[in-house]
Image (spheres, rainbow, N blue to C red):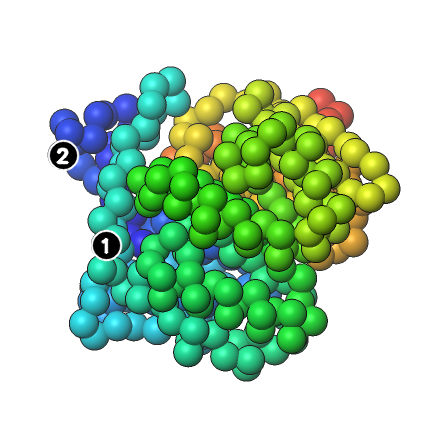
Amino acid sequence: MLLMLAEPGMPLERATHFRRSVAGAESNVAAGLARLGHWARWIGRVGDDPAGEAVLRELRADGIDVSCAEMDPQAPTGLLLRDSHPHRAIDVQYYRGGSAASLLSPAQITPEALAGVRVVHVTGITPMLSEQAAQATRTLIERARQAGAAVSFDPNVRRKLGTDHDWIRVVGPLLREADLVLAGEDELELLLGGGAGEGAKALLTMGRARTVVVKRRDHTAAAYTDAGQWERPPFEVPVVDPVGAGDAFAAGWLSAWLRGLDEPSALAEAACVAALVVQAPADTDGLPTAAARDRALTGFTRGTDSVHR
């Protein structure tokens, strides 16, 4: 979607100045991985309109491959309006009913689009946009299996997209199809019932999951595998804008996973990337390069000079 972000601290209904950016859970993760030095491809749809041109231009600027993106001459690019404040609830308004993204279809998920990929990341938002998008998501998971890629899944529950029952019906089964699950504590409780820890262990035994990472309400995180459980507290940083932290965490985790790091190191890198993102406005402004991540992580863990000279 195109993101129009109100001036800092101003309530959305009173804002007169907006900054244009890009929003979208999967595109945020793609941007995070690209900045961390990984090749990333975004498969999606925008309108053949100025907003769509702006979205694709910004994705390209981050080094994301958009060769499999489509521009729809009939449907518009989705729009997100929101404000930004570190100490009160943020007002987020979505305008994506009938958008190009909601018309994503299985036909767009070709084997060629996934050739050679190591991991395919998707969130629960996409299948909740429409029944057609849900079919495309299921096709994506099937194609990923055929390509030998791992499936990474983040429920990313957005209640404006449907009732609790809708999320349980549409997104709940997808958790069991993922190799890597990155979910909020409340999301696992909703989609699986019971406690998040019990849900994570159930996915390891009854689903395909090799790793389940739970982002808790207190901002700690835990990783579960058959080999054990690891926990990570958050890095204490001043928060400018909390939106995008979950996607940044996912990008940090996936980067570590792609590089073969162990779970404690992956949790630390994920927490570091998330901590950098919440210190900047918009969803992607704070996403670091690999060098910036490493400098920040050293500063967080060893208390080194915060000024890079």
301 to the left or right of 249: right
Q: Residues within 10 Å of mark 1 (few under 14, many from 20)?
A: some
Badge 1 amino acid: Gly
Task: List x then y, in percent, for residue 109.
Answer: 47, 74
Q: Is residue 41 visible?
A: no
User: Which one is in front, 110 or 209?
Assistant: 209
Identified at 42% across, 78% down, the residue is 107
User: Which one is in front, 175 or 77?
Assistant: 175
Task: List x then y, in percent, for residue 219.
Answer: 58, 25
If the image is split into quadrants, where does the N terminus sit? bottom left
Q: Is residue 249 above or below residue 36?
A: above
Badge 2 amino acid: Thr
Quadrant of the image occupied by residue 132: bottom left
Give the residue pinned by disc 2: 16
Task: List x then y, in percent, for residue 187.
Answer: 52, 36
Q: Earlier in the sequence, mark 2 or mark 1?
A: 2
Quadrant of the image occupied by residue 133: bottom left
229 to the left or right of 77: right
Give the residue pinned by disc 1: 97
